[in-house]
Each structure stands twice: as C-alpha cells, then as structure tokens.
Image: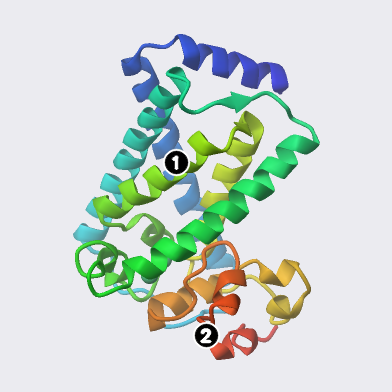
C-alpha cells in the first residue's frame, strides 16, 4: 500500500502537465460518480427518515453546474500539482502518528476557515453572485454537493491550496482528508438522516455534523454554517436551537 502510494507520487512527479491533468480529471469524475452512487444508496436505505420534503425534479441547470464544478475541481487539482512541483506545497512521507495528527489539523483548520468564509458568503454583498447558486435548491440530493457557482469552487480550492502551502502535511493525511471531505459533503446532501436521534448529545462524536445539520442550513440559510462540525456554530451562536432534538426518532 505504502509502496503503491510511493510509486503513484513518483509517477505524478515525472508526468507532463497534460498527463497529470488527464489523471486528475479522471480522479475527480470518478470521485463524483462514487459520491452520487453512495449518496443514492443512503437515500434508498434511509428513505423512512426524510429530513424535509423530497427534492423536486432534476433540472438541466443543476446537472450542468455540477459537471462544471467537477471539471473546475480538476483545474484546482492541477494547480495544486504545479505548486507541489515547484516546492510551494511540500508533503512528507510519514504514515504513523504524525499522519493522524495531520488529518486532525487539516480537518480543524479547514472546518474553521470554511465556517468563516461560509458566513462571509452569506453577507448580502456576496450571497447573490457567489453562494446563492448553492442555495437555489433548498431540498438537497447527493448531486447538490456539486451544485456550486464556479467562483465558489475556486474559493474553496484556493483556501485548500493555501492551507496545504502553509501546513506541510503527509500524503496519507491529504488523501484521508479528501476522502472525509467527500464523505461529509455527500452525507450533508442526502436529504435523509442515517444517524440516531441521540447523535448530537454524544460527547465529542456528537460534535460531528449530521445530514440534518446541513439540510437545516439549506432550509433556514442563517443557521448551521459549519461543515464538518457544529463547534463553531455553538461558539458563535449560529446553531439552529432545535437541532439537538430534530433528528428523526428511531
Ligand atoms: Zn449544501
Ligand atoms: Zn450557505
């Protein structure tokens, strides 16, 4: 596994920009397909626990925005590859405890920065022409994770590349972070709740956000801005008060 990752890194280091772009586009569209497929499985599996009304019929605009987002994510990945090649982003090979620390640091740092930027994006100066696109659909479905204004895709991408250029992480932590980011994003947009009612009351684990948490943000817009956790919303008083009691009873 470690050898395979080492070989992949070496292969990426020796690729031309065209070859790297090809594989990063393939990786992004593959991840997109997996997120939609897994999200849809959750929708079917937990259909007894809807969070709100079912999504309306799929629109052509939603699909186009999502496909554009996946393509632009690939552009961001190519920019990250270039920054890595030029030594602006540096990664290390540790796979032990330091990699686990890196995962926690990346998650906490990105969670805080995304909370702050998300709140800024809801300011009337930015909402209509940046973040409003993601809120066009108040009844999320797995595809909604990718329904973003291109400016927002680049905004998140640049934030991520900035963090990577300031914090030297292990390759394993970057892979784990990206997998968790995709998983959380998917869970946040399935429109059904797989977690038990007691989830938000569980110490520590309960701070991880649920599908309900983000679905309520789509419904209310001015509450639940966090992405991975509800920590910053609790701290800054933006958590939806009935959130603790709003998970479906099971
Ligand atoms: Zn959303
Ligand atoms: Zn929002």
Element assignment for label 2: loop
Element assignment for label 1: helix
Q: CA distance from mark 2 to mark 1?
A: 31 Å
Going by the image, does 182 lie left or right of 78? right
Question: Front-most of 240 and 45?
Answer: 240
Question: Front-most of 170 and 250?
Answer: 170
Q: Quadrant of the N terminus?
A: top right
In the rendered view, would you say 50 is above or below 34? below
Is residue 210 something one can see in this rendering? Answer: no
Disc ID at residue 240: 2
The residue indicated by pointer 1 is: 162
Q: Earlier in the sequence, mark 2 or mark 1?
A: 1
Q: Residue furthest front?
A: 166
| Residue at image point 31% right, 17% down | 18
Is residue 89 something one can see in this rendering? Answer: yes
| Residue at image point 36% right, 30% down | 79
Question: Front-most of 161 and 147?
Answer: 161
Q: Which quadrant of the structure image shows residue 128?
A: bottom left
Q: Quadrant of the C terminus?
A: bottom right
Q: Position of residue 141 (x, y in %)?
A: 41, 66
Disc 1 residue crowd, few under 14, some 14–19, many 20+, Cα 10 Å: some
């Amino acid at each position: 596994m470690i050898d395979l990752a080492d070989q992949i890194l070496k292969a990426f280091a020796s690729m031309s920009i065209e070859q790297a772009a090809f594989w990063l586009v393939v990786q992004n569209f593959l991840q997109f397909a997996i997120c939609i497929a897994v999200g849809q499985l959750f929708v079917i599996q937990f259909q007894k626990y809807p969070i709100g009304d079912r999504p309306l019929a799929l629109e052509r605009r939603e699909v186009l925005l999502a496909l554009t987002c996946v393509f632009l994510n690939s552009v961001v990945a190519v920019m990250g590859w270039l920054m890595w090649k030029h030594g602006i982003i540096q990664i290390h090979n540790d796979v032990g405890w330091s990699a686990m620390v890196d995962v926690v640091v990346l998650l906490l740092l990105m969670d805080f920065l995304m909370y702050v930027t998300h709140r800024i994006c809801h300011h009337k100066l930015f909402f209509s022409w940046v973040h409003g696109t993601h809120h066009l659909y108040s009844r999320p479905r797995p595809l909604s994770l990718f329904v973003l204004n291109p400016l927002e895709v680049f905004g998140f991408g640049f934030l991520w590349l900035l963090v990577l250029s300031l914090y030297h992480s292990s390759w394993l932590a970057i892979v784990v972070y990206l997998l968790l980011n995709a998983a959380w994003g998917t869970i946040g947009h399935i429109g059904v709740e797989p977690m038990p009612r007691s989830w938000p009351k569980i110490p520590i684990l309960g701070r991880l956000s649920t599908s309900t948490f983000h679905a309520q943000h789509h419904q209310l817009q001015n509450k639940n801005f966090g992405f991975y956790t509800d920590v910053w919303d609790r701290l800054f008083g933006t958590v939806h008060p009935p959130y603790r009691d709003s998970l479906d009873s099971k």
